[in-house]
Each structure stands twice: as structure tokens, then as C-alpha cells.
Image (spheres, rainbow, N blue to C red):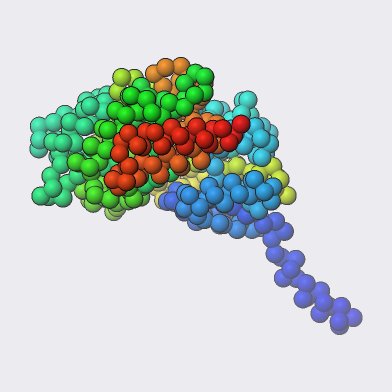
């Protein structure tokens, strides 16, 4: 009898352990850090669930998740994906469909463009944690000092002219800061929106690559001139984080990038220019089509996860109206995930603490995903082409653009190499 009691007592800790472990692959950024911190509340409410976090930077996350999907290995139960992956992987059957969410989740509250971008044939395959577009950040004090006025609807010619006038090497001010770090989600995202505005495109209506067109030559020529003359010297290694730091330090007179930077740059605890920044739309050109991007970091459940039901429950919690309210109550309305729900933009406190909110929502809702270029093209997607293999094509072009900035390639050589690389990679997909 005594041995039986001892055996039962020894087993008690095992009985109290979580029965389900969810392995979550996510990206290292501020919004996801808040989610990890608040997730302890989810574990308290679900004592049978343990959350195991795998936090990576952008490139490592994409590589790890794609490798797991390709291998069929059930390595993760929740993965962080974007608007590029969700419909393509949903079509392949890699992701669990999310068409039976509870009524209280209120899928109709999701911003329509974001919901559509995360769906395949009207079925959601990922739930948006936050959504974003792109916009122009500029120093209104520097504009005033030079007697300049940012138009309500700037184009790239305006940006180029302003940059030349705002550069002040003596005081360490760069007229324009732009991404240059290679990657389909880095320099290529920016350059593709710029190309769209200039009337360039990745493919014609017969799916022939057009990376060596006169329009692309004009894009690369202007981009190279602007970053060399008016940007920081290390543009080829600058991504979102590096330029965010430069802008927060007051060193960038203008920056064109993701709308998610707005909340950080108006925070005086982070930004030295919190009271000096103003916001404008991302620049257009001969067309507005595709001039600002649409993206969402979203949570999805691999179809082969053995914990599908628990994983869907978790991502429903992490992307719900209730979660957004928890962030507001704990951290403040200025820290809530933007660009995912209509109800967020109806909150008076959010409107007061986020003076850019209406502009961000307008940019997201006006992104021309289905008509991203001046001419009709057979693809969708703004800052990327929504086809299998574009991640490889974009990475190859991104490396060539970085080589251009580093003086290893001329504009003409970059154009031809882009054309050759995309043609080769397109053939490999067929």
C-alpha cells in the first residue's frame, strides 16, 4: 500500500504538466514580443497548453518555415506567414483552412484587403496579426526651414527634388533614406513599388520577364542617384531596422517604408524627432497603381500539425478584438497591432494616440493588389508577384541591386542580369 501511494505521489507532477505543446515560429519584432509577453494569460486560461516559442529574424523565419513545409515535417503548430505565402500555401494544401471560426471572432471585422490577401478562393488560411502599407515619413521642421511643402499626393520626382535640397552633410542629415539590403521582402519590395509607379512591371501579359525594359532602367538610374547623392553611405546593408534607427536619431529628412514605423517614430522614448515628423502617401509616378504596398504578418496552422484544434484556438485569441483590447489595457493604445481590424480604427483613444491612423487605413484599403501596374498584367501582388518561385526571383534581383549600389555592376549590367536570373528561375518552376 505504501509503495502504491509513493508511486501515485511521484506521478502527480506529470499529471499537472500541460498535455499539449504548441510550437510557434514567429518573427522578432516589437509587436510579436508583446504577444509573447501577453501569452502567459492565454496559458493561465488554458492550463493544458504550453507555448513553445521559436523566434527568428525575417530571413531565418522564412527559411525555417519553408523548409518545414517542403519536408512535410510537423515541426511547427503555428507559423508566421505573410500575404505572399498564405494563398499559395493554402492552394497547395499546406495550411489548415480557417472557415469555421467561432462567431465571437468576428471575421467580418477584419479589413477587407487584408482578409482577401490572406485567402484562397474566399477561404482564409491565415489570421492577420497586423497589416501594413507603405508611406512617406518626413521632417516638417527641415521642410519649413527650406521653404518646402510636401504635396498631398507626392510623386518620385518630388521626392528626388526634395532630397537634393534637404541633404545637409555638415549637420549629418541625409535627404532620403531607402532600403538597400538584398531580399525579396527588403530592397525588392521598395524597388517594385517604385517600378510600378514608373510604369515598369515584372512580366508582360504573356508571362515574359521585362526586367530590362526602359522603364526599369529609369527606376534603377534614379534609385542609384538618390541613394548615392542623398542617402547614407551604407545603403546596401540597410533594412527596416537600420533606417528606423537613423530616422529616430534625426538623421533622415525623408524615409519611404512600412507604415508600422509610425507608432515607433512618434514615441518620444524612442525617437528624438517624435514631434517633428509628418506623414504623406508613398510616392506615385505616371500611375498610382502599385505605388504603395500591402502586407500582413499573419498566423497560420500547418495542415499536418497534430495539434490543429489547439493551434487554431491560439491564433484566434492572438488576432482577436479581445487581444487588441488587452494590449491597449496593458501597454497602451499606441502599441496595439495596426491594420488588421475595422474596430481598432473606431476607437477614439487609438485615433487620438495614433495621428497617422486614418492615413494608414486609407493606404491599406487603396492598395491595388489586383491591378498593380499601369498596364494589365497576369499577376497580382503589389511589392511582390504572387506566384510560386517569386521568393527566389526576388532574392536574386535583390542581390543584383545590392551589387549595383556597391559598384560591382553598372545599371545596364544589373538590368541584363535581372532579366537572365528571372528567366532562368521562371523556367525552373515550369
Viewer-nearest residue: 388 or 111: 388
Q: Position of residue 417 (x, y in %)?
A: 41, 37
Q: Position of residue 214 (x, y in %)?
A: 33, 24
Residue that sits furthest to the right in the current view: 1
Q: Position of residue 402 (x, y in %)?
A: 35, 45
Examine the rendered structure and indicate whether residue 21 appears above or below residue 8. above
The total of numbered circles placed on residues is: 0
Residue shown at 58% from the left, 36% from the top = 428
Can residue 176 be seen in this snapshot? yes
Can residue 276 be seen in this snapshot? no
- In the picture provided, is 395 more to the left or to the right than 222? right
Q: Quadrant of the C terminus?
A: top right
Viewer-nearest residue: 21 or 117: 117
Examine the rendered structure and indicate whether residue 39 appears above or below residue 119. below
Examine the rendered structure and indicate whether residue 183 appears above or below residue 369. below
Viewer-nearest residue: 326 or 86: 86
Residue that sits furthest to the top in the current view: 376
Residue shown at 60% from the left, 42% from the top = 300
Residue shown at 17% from the left, 46% from the top = 173
Q: Quadrant of the N terminus?
A: bottom right
Examine the rendered structure and indicate whether residue 159 appears above or below residue 403. above
Q: Position of residue 117 (x, y in %)?
A: 53, 30
Q: Quadrant of residue 285?
A: top left
- In the picture provided, is 313 more to the left or to the right than 318? right
Residue shown at 63% from the left, 49% from the top = 68
Amino acid at each position: 500500500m505504501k509503495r502504491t501511494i509513493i508511486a501515485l505521489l511521484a506521478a502527480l507532477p506529470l499529471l499537472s504538466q500541460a498535455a499539449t505543446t504548441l510550437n510557434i515560429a514567429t518573427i522578432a519584432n516589437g509587436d510579436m514580443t508583446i504577444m509573447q509577453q501577453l501569452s502567459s494569460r492565454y496559458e493561465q486560461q488554458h492550463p493544458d497548453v504550453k507555448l513553445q516559442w521559436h523566434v527568428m529574424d525575417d530571413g531565418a523565419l522564412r527559411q525555417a518555415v519553408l523548409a518545414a513545409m517542403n519536408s512535410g515535417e510537423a515541426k511547427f503548430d503555428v507559423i508566421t506567414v505573410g500575404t505572399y505565402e498564405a494563398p499559395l500555401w493554402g492552394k497547395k494544401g499546406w495550411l489548415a483552412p480557417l472557415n469555421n471560426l467561432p462567431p465571437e471572432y468576428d471575421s467580418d471585422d477584419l479589413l477587407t484587403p487584408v482578409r482577401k490577401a490572406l485567402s484562397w478562393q474566399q477561404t482564409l488560411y491565415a489570421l492577420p496579426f497586423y497589416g501594413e502599407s507603405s508611406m512617406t515619413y518626413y521632417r516638417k521642421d527641415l521642410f519649413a526651414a527650406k521653404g518646402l511643402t510636401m504635396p498631398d499626393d507626392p510623386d518620385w520626382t518630388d521626392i528626388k527634388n526634395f532630397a537634393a535640397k534637404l541633404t545637409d552633410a555638415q549637420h549629418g542629415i541625409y535627404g532620403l533614406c531607402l532600403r538597400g539590403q538584398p531580399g525579396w521582402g527588403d530592397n525588392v519590395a521598395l524597388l517594385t513599388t517604385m517600378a510600378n509607379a514608373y510604369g515598369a512591371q515584372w512580366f508582360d501579359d504573356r508571362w515574359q520577364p521585362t526586367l530590362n525594359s526602359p522603364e526599369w532602367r529609369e527606376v534603377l538610374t534614379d534609385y542609384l542617384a538618390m541613394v548615392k547623392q542623398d542617402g547614407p553611405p551604407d545603403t546596401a546593408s540597410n533594412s527596416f531596422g537600420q533606417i528606423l534607427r537613423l530616422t529616430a536619431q534625426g538623421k533622415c529628412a525623408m524615409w519611404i517604408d512600412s507604415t508600422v514605423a509610425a507608432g515607433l517614430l512618434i514615441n518620444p522614448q524612442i525617437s528624438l524627432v517624435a514631434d517633428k515628423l509628418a506623414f504623406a502617401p508613398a510616392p506615385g509616378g505616371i500611375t498610382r497603381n502599385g505605388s504603395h504596398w500591402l502586407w500582413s504578418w499573419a498566423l497560420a496552422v500547418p495542415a499536418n500539425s497534430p495539434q490543429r484544434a489547439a493551434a487554431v484556438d491560439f491564433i484566434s485569441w492572438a488576432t482577436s478584438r479581445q487581444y487588441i483590447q488587452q494590449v491597449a489595457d496593458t501597454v497602451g493604445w499606441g502599441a496595439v497591432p495596426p491594420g488588421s481590424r475595422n474596430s481598432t480604427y473606431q476607437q477614439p483613444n487609438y485615433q487620438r494616440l495614433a495621428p497617422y491612423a486614418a492615413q494608414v487605413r486609407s493606404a491599406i484599403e487603396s492598395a491595388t493588389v489586383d491591378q498593380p501596374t499601369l498596364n494589365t498584367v497576369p499577376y497580382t501582388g503589389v511589392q511582390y508577384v504572387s506566384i510560386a518561385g517569386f521568393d527566389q526571383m526576388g532574392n536574386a534581383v535583390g542581390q543584383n541591386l545590392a551589387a549595383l549600389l556597391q559598384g560591382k555592376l553598372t545599371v545596364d549590367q544589373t538590368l541584363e542580369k535581372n532579366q537572365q536570373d528571372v528567366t532562368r528561375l521562371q523556367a525552373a518552376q515550369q
